[in-house]
Every structure is written in C-alpha cells, then in structure tokens.
Amino acid sequence: QGACEARGCTWCATDVANAPWCFFPKDSPYGYSLGGNTEKTAKGWRVTLNKRQASSLFGNDISPVVLEVEFQTRDRLRFKLYDPNRQRFEVPLQIDSPGVTADEASYDAEF
C-alpha cells in the first residue's frame, strides 16, 4: 500500500478476485486521456488516446494511440490498441465478427 500511494496511485483493497488494488486515479498525470471525440463505427467504437504530460513510468510511450472496440458477439468484446503512425505486422488470423449492437450485448463500454 505504501509503495502504491508513494507513486501517486490510489489504493483500494477489494475481495473481488483478480481486481487491481493499486491504480492511477482519474486525474493522474500518468497514462493516457481521450484526445478528441469518440467515433462510432460499424462494429463498435474508435477513440484516440493521447499520452499525458508526466514522465513515463515504463518508457517508450507512443502518442497518440488508437483504441478500437468491437462488439463481436453478445458475450465477446474485442479491443485493439495501435500506433496510427507506424504500421506493424499483424498475424493474418480471421475471426468471425458478426457485430452486435450495444443493447444486445451482455456488457457495456464507457469512455
């Protein structure tokens, strides 16, 4: 707990399995923030994230980063983070993505 709070993070003990106890608060200078509007796509959402101004805790951060969220099935959500300015190799794996509307899904996404 002390190391967590010394980094400026929030400590919140929980009984929920695999839930993080230490995390960045919403107003943290670390991490990323929404950079512009959320864009509705045929299969979900696309948002641009910009690195906040604080020094990185991990190094070599990319900014901006695009987050694509795809509502694939009632119980399956796919998300993809990528650098929009540099192309990278992607495994040519086809995954059926019929796409569902948010109100049909058993989950929700908020930005």
Image (tube, grey):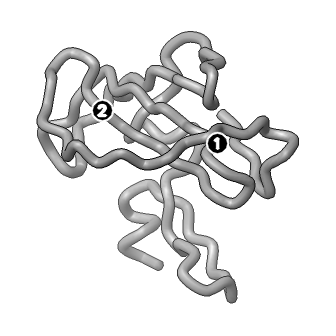
Give the residue at x 15% y 21%: 86
Reply above or below: 98 against 63: below
Q: Position of residue 14 (x, y in %)?
A: 67, 82
Residue type at numbered disc 2: Tyr
Residue found 64% across the figure and 42% down from its top: 71
Q: Examine the image and state in which quarter residue 66 appears.
A: top left
Image-based side of 62 in relation to 35, left or right: left
**23 w.r.t. 109: above or below:** below
Residue 6 in the image: state x and y as whole percent: 38, 64
Q: Amino acid at mark 1?
A: Phe
- According to the picture, the residue beneath numbered tag 1 turns out to be 71
- The residue nearer to you, when weighing 28 against 71, is 71
Numbered disc 1: secondary structure: strand
| Mark 1–mark 2 distance (CA, rounded to whole Å) | 18 Å
- Could you tell whether 45 is left or right of 75 in the image? left
Residue to which mark 2 is pinned: 82
> Is 24 located above or below residue 16 in the figure?
above
Q: Tag 2 or tag 1, which sits nearer the N-term?
A: 1
Please state if 65 lies on the left or on the right of 36 as rendered: left
For the residue labelled by badge 2, is the local secondary structure a helix, a strand or a loop? strand
Residue farthest toward the right in the current orientation of the protein: 103
Q: Residue at x 43, y 49 (%)?
A: 95
In the rendered image, the quadrant that contains the C terminus is top right
Rendering coords of residue 88 (x, y %): 13, 32
Residue 53: quarter of image = top left
Report whether 29 appears left or right of 103: left
Mark 2 surroundings within 10 Å by alpha-carbon count, few (fewer than 14), some (14 through 19), many (20 or more): some
